[in-house]
Each structure stands twice: as C-alpha cells, then as structure tokens.
Amino acid sequence: MHYQIYDDPGVIDMPDATDTLVEYYRCISSEHPDRDEYRQTLANQDKSVIRIRLTRWGPISTGGFPPELFQDD
C-alpha cells in the first residue's frame, strides 16, 4: 500500500524554531528541569524544524478506508 501526500512545507530556523522544538520535546519526553539550559542547548545545536501542513492525501486504495468516509475536493 502506498500514499501520496500533498503538502505546504516550510523550514523554521533558529531562533524562531526554539518554541516549536521545546513543545515537541516536551510532548515526547516531558518538561526539562532547566528550561534556560535546554533552550541554550537547542540554540547551540542550531536545529531547524521542517513543518509539513498536509493539504490532501490519496489515493484511496482497494482494501483501505471506505471511500464514503472521505470527501473528494
């Protein structure tokens, strides 16, 4: 089975990516005990965020989800 996705991608670089990365890591591993140290570590690593906003996907394949559950634009 395969899927094709259509998206509106964007790259967020530091320092704008800091809040997004903090929230992401908070969701997967809880709050860091020292927020300032954690933010500085992210800045030192010069991480970026690739944000993908899914605009649509397809195709609905045989054996997959029933087509009537999805509205075709």
Image (tube, grey):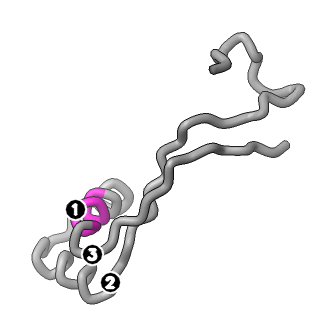
Label 2's element? loop
Does 37 sit left or right of 70 as displayed? left
What distance separates the C-alpha of mark 3 from that of mark 1?
Answer: 10 Å
Q: Which residue is mark 2?
A: 46
Asked which quadrant contains residue 19, the reply is: bottom left
Label 3's element? loop
Residue at the image point whose x is 31% and y is 65% from the top? 21
Does 3 sit left or right of 1 as displayed? left
Q: Which residue is mark 3?
A: 14
Residue at the image point whose x is 44% and y is 56% from the top? 51
Asked which quadrant contains residue 1, the reply is: top right
Image position, residue 47 (x, y; %): 36, 78
Disc on the earlier residue, 1 or 2: 1
Amino acid tagged 3? Met
Vertical comparison of 39 with 4: above or below = below
Query: The C terminus appears in which quarter of the rendering?
Result: top right
Q: Which residue is mark 1?
A: 19
> Magenta segment range?
17-23
Disc on the earlier residue, 3 or 2: 3
Image position, residue 18 (x, y; %): 24, 68
Of 62 and 29, nearer the camera is 62
Q: Farthest residue in the top direction?
A: 68
Q: Are marks 3 and 2 in contact (CB under 8 Å)?
A: yes
Residue at the image point whose x is 50% and y is 48% from the top? 8
Main secondary structure found in the magenta portion: helix
Asked which quadrant contains residue 55, the reply is: top right
Q: Are marks 1 and 2 in contact (CB under 8 Å)?
A: no
> Is residue 42 found inside the magenta-colored segment of the image?
no
Does 33 sit left or right of 12 as displayed? left
Residue at the image point whose x is 38% and y is 58% from the top? 28
